[in-house]
Image: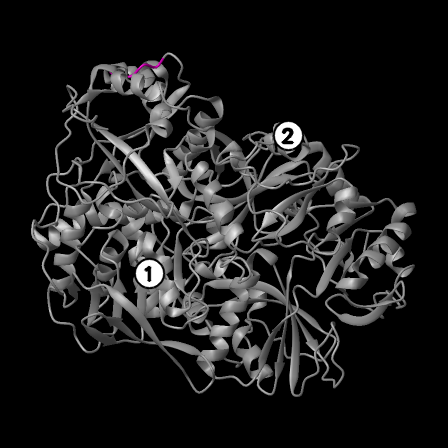
Amino acid sequence: MLMPGVPMASLNRALCVAATRPRWSPACSLGLRPLTSGAVPTTEKSVPYQRTLKQAQVAQGPTRPLPSTANVVVIGGGSLGCQTLYHLAKLGVSGAVLLERERLTSGTTWHTAGLLWQLRPSDVEVELLAHTRRVVSRDLEEETGLHTGWIQNGGLFIASSRQRLDEYKRLMSLGKAYGVESHVLSPAETKALYPLMNVDDLYGTLYVPQDGTMDPAGTCTTLARAATARGAQVIENCPVTGIRVRTDDFGVRRVAAVETEHGSIQTPCVVNCAGVWAGAVGRMAGVKVPLVAMHHAYVVTERIEGIQVSDKFAFSLFDLDWDVFTQHIEGAINRVPVLEKTGVKSTVCGPESFTPDHKPLMGEAPELRGFFLGCGFNSAGMMLGGGCGQELAHWIVHGRPEKDMYGYDIRRFHHSLTDHRRWIRERSHESYAKNYSVVFPHDEPLAGRNMRRDPLHEELLARGCVFQERHGWERPGWFNPGGGTAPVLPYDYYGAYGHAAHEDHAYGRLLQDEYTFDFPPHHDVIKKECLACRGAAAVFNMSYFGKFYLVGLDARRAADWLFSADVSRPPGSTVYTCMLNQRGGTESDLTVSRLAPGTQASALAPAFEGDGYYLAVGGAAAQHNWSHISTVLQDHKFRCQLVDSSEDLGMISIQGPASRAILQEVLDADLSNEAFPFSTHKLVRAAGHLVRAMRLSFVGELGWELHIPGPSCVPVYQAVMAAGAKHGLVNAGYRAIDSLSIEKGYRHWHSDLRQDDSPLEAGLAFTCKLKSAIPFLGREALERQRAEGLRRRLVCFTVDEKVPMFGLEAIWRNGQVVGHIRRADFGFAIDKTLAYGYIRDPSGGPVSLDFVKSGDYVLERMGVTYPARAHLKSPFDPDNKRVKGLY
């Protein structure tokens, strides 16, 4: 910060001034604060870039005439807007237009630090970052002859705790699967590489030689130049004032035009890349955009010997709050002592958008067809821009991105949350407060909790349930025996903004135990839940599942097209199936139960004519499933209805060898194999309450699901627990489900099975009706894949040594990296670590079964390799006897 009347100030002097002010709150330690209505930009400041696009005299009116029509209109000329326009042009989209209210990069992009690193604890993000790097370091310069400002100066990431170093070791192992060079350095090696650093309190560092920085203005200028050379148009000084919407003959809202002060552009497709102003653009179209604008700050020092920092004129900024920023300066001086005598050349404090789950908002809005989002990048828009711009362009042109983008898809949020102000505010605050926190495998949010609770919540809480949160739902994670209750308390903002911090509470203590890359203290508790299920019985509360009815005159036609398996079986049948996209990737896996038509509506079935199906889908993906099905119904104009009964029905599942004996005391139905076969369902009475019973298993045991109207959930659950007392029945949570399901080899969607994985690659060919002549979405892609040979396969691995694995471990075959682990857990019945990952043939050819069987494998965890055995079938009950009740 430039002190009034002083041309420059040292960091040491800045500390002295800041020390006289009220101390900062620990919750604000990232230098980020929510924007307030009173926040206004100050005069322009100097930031470290050589040039900007800002002109001394701002032109009046748009920089070029508006076209009357466009195939796509991109709103916002920052990183995402420019990258999206560039990739649309590369895909051959003619008539794409970018509208910028002022000048390119004038919003958030111009004041970004421009960092680009390559390793993150997400394989998808590693791929997205790699594409950005290719675009800015190679592609743009080859296409235009212009330099983007890319500097490959390497990245050095500091570990001041053992846990942070463990995280870096995980990233190093993942990097080997993607060819990203990285090295975990000791403190002494770090000092040799960077002599200015104080390493006395370090555990080590992660060094990534090919990381770098880019000039935001230079990059966006070059992107615009490359896009316009391919026929796109960039129009600056043209604020958007409205989005015109039309409703088609089937009642579906669609984009019609973009309105500005200088005219309108008719278009079927709008892309909202407006950054912190994306919410305002969304409101123009009636689209909810769940993000919050924050202050994002850094300082620019004077030149340090050996470090070059250049000057650049700037757009408007906010004043830096030194009360908040003091800790960063103290930490910087401790780490690089020379900074204490280095002057502050300028401060940078501008707006940045954060989202409730720290992931961007992308894809087509469920409320409005043709309205796409590309915003909410949590201070990572520059580095993720190239990869996300490419995927967004594919999304617009081909109907789906090439990669799995579910984690970024706006449809991941339940509709009840996207305009819930408290949930958005709390979760977005926590996402920036933990922006640089270590990413642990089993962390849970403390913000935005208790938003969606099922009828059994209080009952399970009293029995020691430790809850997880998934898209607003509270679901059982595991049960703490004898430990009392562990309620999730209201969010305390980590003691900021006048809130009193929760000093000590049971849930917080238990969550602290999860901050490890080792087995947590309650590992043996989860073991007891798993072994009780294998040896006797366990009851799982799965009320958080999505529960939909697909009914109507065209329901059978819709089901044939939507589902990869043949679900047109007699009423009373239940089928496990997938839903695919046109690329053959898996949008979902679910169960589909055929219903008999009826005229009496109830919570367990609507009244309908024609055909009807009951769909049960994983709760975390329920909104995604709803949106996918709705889009297909709209595109094909099927005459049927999709009814959401997720909030009206609860669901418990009783699994294990004793499940039949327990439920026979509760249900008024014959549960023998002959009377109630596997994959069937019936309406029965449980303790006098009407429920839908399904004989299914997600853990590889004899078992049933009970789908129960909300008011009946507690009495039915209590009757089951009473009947199970003499059979060893226990409560179990999703941590047990994770272990039991991986032990049996059942797939989890969005880990083993994603939007860019086909059922053939995942070993789920049995879910595809390829032997029939029935068309279904994705069939042509699967047929091509089958004819050409599978280029990768999902393989099960077991490791004899008891070592915790969580995914992202590198897979080595005969001394070569052939993939990485998607999901891993410990299997208590077989007493081994299990891991699933896709492997490829390094030669690029198809991956045959012989290729899988003939290799010698090791899995690399945190730089250490462990011998592993590959399996083509689950090592637990490979003949499926237990689900048939054969023990």
Q: CA distance from mark 2 to mark 1?
A: 41 Å
Is 39 placed left or right of 554 in the picture? left
Between discs 2 and 1, the one toward the N terminus: 1
SS at mark 1?
helix
Is 880 placed left or right of 295 in the picture? right
Q: Which mark is residue 509?
A: 2
Q: Which residue is mark 1?
A: 392
Question: Which residue is located at x 57 percent, y 40 percent?
Answer: 491
> Is residue 562 positioned above or below 726 on the image?
below
Q: Quadrant of residue 237?
A: bottom left
Question: Which residue is located at x 89 percent, y 66 percent?
Answer: 688
- The crowd level at tag 1 (other Cα within 10 Å; few <14, some 14-19, many 20+) is many
Which stretch appears magenta?
Answer: 195-199
Q: Nearer the viewer, residue 187 or 294?
A: 294
Q: Tell me, yes or no, whether the two marked residues, 2 and 1, touch with CB atoms within 8 Å.
A: no
Q: Picture coordinates of residue 54 (x, y %)?
A: 12, 49
SS at mark 2?
helix
Amino acid type of the residue that numbered disc 2 sits on in the rendered structure = Arg
